[in-house]
Image (tube, rainbow, N blue to C red):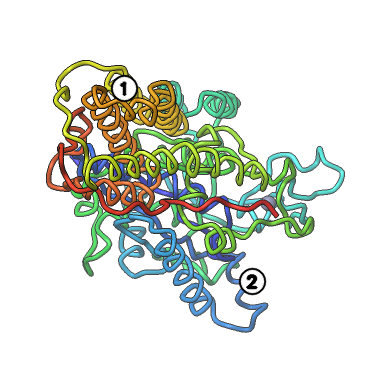
Amino acid sequence: MTFVITTPLYYVNDKPHLGSVYTTIICDSIARYKRLVGEDVLFITGVDEHGLKIQRKANEMGIEPKSHCDEISKVFNTNWENWDISFDKFIRTSSNNHKLIVNEFYERVKSSDDIYMGVQKGWYCVGCEEFKDNPENSSTYKCPIHQKNLEWKNEENLFFRLSKYQKEIEEIINQPSFIEPIERRNEIINFVAKGLKDFSISRTNVSWGIPVPDHDKHTFYVWFDALLGYVSAMNSDTKDNSLEKSINKGWPADIHLIGKDILRFHAVYWPAMLISADMKVPKKVLGHGFLTREGQKMGKSLGNVLDPDLLLSKYGNDPVRWYLIKDISLGNDGDFQDKRFVDIINNDLANTIGNLLNRTSSMSRKWFDNKVPNNEKILGENKLKFYAKNAVKNYIQHFNIYKLDLAANEVLSLAINTNLYLNNNQPWVLIKEKDNLPLVKEIIYNVLESTRIIGLLLLPLVPELSSKINEQLGSIYKEEIPWEQQLSWGILVSNSILPKPNPIINKLEYE
Ligand SMILES: [Zn+2]
């Protein structure tokens, strides 16, 4: 069984914004976790390149759409490498083997008698690449998201018989595990209850798209094309991609992680298209919230867009990851606040975790000849062992249901408890009496061992920081031994050498 997780295929009108970075980091964290617990993971990301918006953007710049897409898709690829994203596949929807999949899929849907020619009339937002339901109700005829004028369209299009799948879609969206979080599910249930309408899957005025076979001037509607990118990505490295081969690589997807604005496409249109083509529907669609900045919506006109490149170069990967994963409950909206960011990183990572490791390792080196103390009570029970066991258990439970913020908080709680244990026991006082030596050894060992487990639990969340903690404890993590096995208590070896302490994370300054 392959665990398939996808980011949205990002639209190439611009370089990645903070929202795309957020989605991709969450997917990366889940993919890393799944690999650690022994699953065979296929982590898919990529870019959605077709459509009127891209065609116009390229025209404005006086270049071919293809060269624009080449450039921006390269930017995305490099970006994910800079963020150390562990994706397995990067799909471009302008690639030839994606086109093969779209054509084959279309043939299947056609043979299910789900395609017909009709006339599409309505108000269209090019930014959304979507017809808007009732613009008559608004006085402005503007897209509520883009605040741009809608365009009237009246053209012959090919339609997909979405209405035929009303019952199937109702059944799917009523499964509690299909759409998360629950508030999002209710929105979709209400939308579907109004009755599904067929939707057009081709355009006649868009040249930058995949041509529809046997229909001159028609190209596939960008969403019909883009959603199939998830399937074509599965087997994208061969020149003769086919639906069967892609499916055999592990379709259906286990999770589509997306922003809440594109939930309808993923939870309604997409499953219906798949059923029509006799394919399995994804197991879960997880719609996350939007990011604001200091409580305000980010936008070019407001001039408050937070550039993820700047964040990365200024603070590094781990602090941004930790903030986005720990401070935002997946599914809810999140707010990026500079002061809060600095405070969280300094408190959680620098003080609570970094400082704990640094001072305990220094004491151990000073008192025990640069080594981990020889603890004769490793097998016995102690408070920290109890805390660690619980933290591991809860962490795994949370991660398994994608409550990444709660998993991160478990690690932090363990670190807080470990600091308390150290402060309550005061080994720096005890060491003054020779008789206390066995007790001091036990205390220091327990704290170092707890820190080792903290480091391991951080591996899917903040990988760089995790490996720094591991290095500081003598690099004892072994990739060939199952990760979960290494989470048990007592693996740190008595008398093993402790490297010279280095701060694992620097404190940030608030400007
Ligand atoms: Zn729009």
What is the three-letter code of the residue carrying label 2? Arg
Could one spot residue 233 in this view of the protein? yes
Neighbourhood count class around disc 1 (C-alpha, 10 Å): few under 14, some 14–19, many 20 upward: many
Disc 2 target residue = 56
Question: Quick one: quadrant of the C terminus?
Answer: bottom right
State which quarter of the image contains the N terminus.
top left
Residue 421, by quadrant, is: top left
Within 10 Å of disc 2 (Cα), the crowding (few <14, some 14-19, many 20+) is: some
Residue denoted by label 1: 384
- Among numbered discs 1 and 2, the one appearing first in the sequence: 2
Q: Amino acid at mark 1?
A: Leu
Q: Is residue 186 left or right of residue 363?
A: right
Q: Which mark is residue 431?
A: none
- For the point 42% across and 66% down, the residue is 77
At mark 1, the secondary structure is: helix
Residue at left offset 69%, top offset 46%: 293
190 or 412: nearer the viewer: 412
- Foreground tag (1 vs 2): 1
Q: Residue 160: x, y in percent?
A: 47, 45
Residue 161 appears in the picture as rendered:
no
Q: Is residue 11 above or below residue 450?
A: below
Element at label 2: helix
